[in-house]
Image (cartoon, helix red, strand yellow):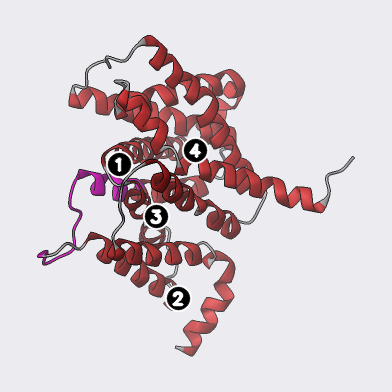
Amino acid sequence: MMPSKHETIALPVLALLFSATIWGVMWYPLRLFEAQGLGGLWVTFIFFAAATAVGMTLMSAHLGELRKQPWIALGIALASGWTNTSFNLAMLEGNILRMLLLFYLSPLWATLIGRAFMGEHLTSFSILLLVISVLGSLFMLWQPGMMIPWPTDRADWLAIGSGMGFAILNALVRQGQQINIPAKMLASWFGVLLVAGIWIAITGTMWPLADLEVIGAAAAFGAVVIVIATLSVQYGVTHMPVHRSAVILLFELVAGAISAWLLTDEVITAKEWLGGSLIVVAAAISARLHFRSKFCQQIDRAA
C-alpha cells in the first residue's frame, strides 16, 4: 500500500521535531555524564566514537564517495567537529537557553559567508535580517557598564563559535553535491572525533575518572541517540523544503527552554528574552529567503 499524502508530509515533520527535541535537551545527558566524572570533551569523543562505529558498520560502502570532493569532505569533517564539540562545551558551561539563542545567530554568519565566499547577492530584505540578528545579539550580550556589547565568558564564545561552524558546515554540505548523504554523515561524525581528540591532546585533558558503566552508557547513548537523531534530521531535510525544515528545527529552542525551566533554576533576563526573540525571528525568516527571491527582488526594485 502506498503511503497517503498526509503520511508523506507527517513523517518528515515528526522526524524533524524528534531531532530538534533531542538536540534541545542534549544539555541534560551531558550534565548527567559530567556529574558522573565524564567531562565535556571526553563525553563528546565517546558519543561520536560510538556513532562512527555504527556508521562504519552500516555505511562503510559509501566511503568512496568522499574521494569525489576530498577538500569539501575534509571541510565538512572539521566544521562538524568544531560545531558539535564547542556546542557541547557551551551547554555544559553556560546558561542553556542563552547558549541556544547565541548558537542560532548562525543565519547571520550563513548570510555573510554566502556573500563573501559563494557570491550570493545581498538583497535589502536579507540586510534587514542581518540588522535584526545583530540587534538581537547586542541586546543579549550587553551588560551594565559595558561600553561595547561583547561575549562575557568562554561559554558565550563557544556558543557563537558553534553557530559560525554550523553555518560553514551548511555551506559546505550544499557545495558537496557530488557526495551522498551517508558519506557526509560519516565525515561529520569522524570530524567530531578528530576535533575532540585534538582538543583533548592540546589541553592535556586526562582520561576521565568515570566508572566503566558510565563510559559504557555514554557509548550506548552515542550509538543509539546520536545516530537516530542524525538520521532523523537527514530524513526530514531530504523529504521537505529547506525553508520549512529550518523553521521546524527552531523547535530546539522550545525544547531547551522547557527542559531548562523544569530541570534547572537558571533564569533568562528580560533583555535576553528580547534579544533572543529578535534572533529567532531573523532565523525563521532567513530560512525562507531562498524560496522568496522573487519577493526580495520586488522589494529591491521598490527601494
Q: CA distance from mark 3 to mark 4?
A: 28 Å
Distance of label 2 from label 1 (alpha carbons): 31 Å
| SS at mark 3 in the image | loop
Q: Is residue 128 above or below residue 200?
A: below
Q: Residue at x 35, y 63 (%)?
A: 273
Using the numbered discs, state the Cα–Cα distance from disc 2 to disc 4 in whole angstroms.
33 Å
The amino acid on which the numbered mark 2 sits, given as a three-letter code, is Phe
Residue 250 versus residue 24 in the image, above or below: below
State the residue position of label 2.
125
User: Nearer the observer, disc 1 or disc 4?
Assistant: 1
Q: Which residue is mark 4?
A: 69
Name the kind of residue labelled 4 in the image. Answer: Gln
Going 43% across and 58% down the picture, which residue do you hit? 118
Residue at numbered disc 3: 104
Q: Quadrant of the N terminus?
A: top right
Mark 1 lies on residue: 90
Amino acid at pointer 3: Tyr
* Front-lying residue, 194 or 104: 104
Specify whether residue 150 is painted magenta. Answer: yes
| Tag 3 near tag 1, CB within 8 Å | no
The answer to whether residue 51 shows anywhere in this view is: no
Question: Is residue 99 on the magenta stretch?
Answer: no
Q: Can you say whether 221 is above or below 1 in the image?
A: above
Q: Which mark is residue 156?
A: none
The crowding category of the residue bearing disc 1, from other C-alpha atoms within 10 Å (few below 14, some 14 to 19, many at least 20), is many
- Residue at x 56%, y 38% (from the top left corner): 179
- Evaluate if marks 2 and 1 touch, with contact meaning CB atoms under 8 Å apart: no
